Amino acid sequence: MNTRHTDTPTPEILPLPAFNDNYIWTLRAGKNVAVVDPGDAAVVEDYINRHGLSLTAILITHHHADHTGGVLALTATRGIPVFGPASEDIAGVTHPVSEGGRVSLDALGISFDVLEVPGHTRTHIAYLAPGVLFPGDTLFSAGCGRLLGGTAEQLHASLQRLADLPAQTRVYCTHEYTLANLRFACAAEPENAERDDWQRHCERERAAGRPTLPSTIGQEKLINPFLRTDSDQLLGALTEHVGHRPANALECFTELRRWKDVF
């Protein structure tokens, strides 16, 4: 997959903090910028105005208001494409996309494949370019989204699909949930040296006012309990929590998600 044009620099990817813990991801090349899941228009407008940028596109992963709330305001005076899941009626989406679709951001020199990754919601999508993944609320560092419309079976399958991506793929999650997720990960898998190293790294980053993201697929496979349902440590802790040993990976994932919901 070609991610750049010869006359366009590779986009820089930076987060705009919004609300309590959201990130609106920006892709910037020169004076052109696209944004992913802009729940707050004011945050984006401030960034654009401060840097003299031109907003060229919006990418939406799912319908929740903290990911879509700024779309109509941002497009009120701009004739720009807004990409979003085709199977959901989201106000402001001009280019509905689905599995196998392609999003070409010519002004930024990058293109994305569309992946359907339901579970958190029934119609969730992700955007994938070589080395770059915007998973919305499907995958977090050390965690995953709640079931708010989809099923555990769907979310488990979606996460397994993402886990099969190249290890170096950078994961641009949409929430700064990492430290809270890691606290649960410590309970779910008491002994995990890689996870403990990642936790110390993330604590340093947050103490310095920096995001814990992006992570990578390879990192998540080492530390994310929802991608580690075959871990003996995790199975032991989960068996103690629920009172029986899960029969398979899906049951393990389902019980793990239930445990996290009340942790």
Image (tube, grey):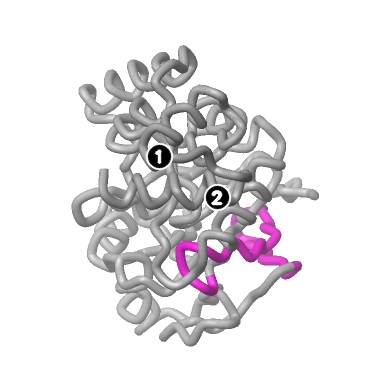
Residue 12 screen position, x and y as percent = 51, 42
Q: Residue at x 61, y 29 (%)?
A: 218
* 1 relative position to 90: left or right: right
> Could you tell me which secondary element the residue under label 2 belongs to?
helix
Residue 169 screen position, x and y as percent = 63, 37
> Could you tell me which secondary element the residue under label 1 belongs to?
loop
Residue sitting nearer the eye, 227 or 141 = 227
Residue type marked 2: Glu
* 150 relative position to 21: left or right: right
Residue wearing tag 1:
243
Residue type marked 1: Gly
Residue wearing tag 2:
251
Q: Residue at x 37, y 66 (%)?
A: 67
Q: Earlier in the sequence, mark 1 or mark 2?
A: 1
Provide the residue span drawn in magenta. Answer: 100-123
Residue 242 screen position, x and y as percent = 39, 42
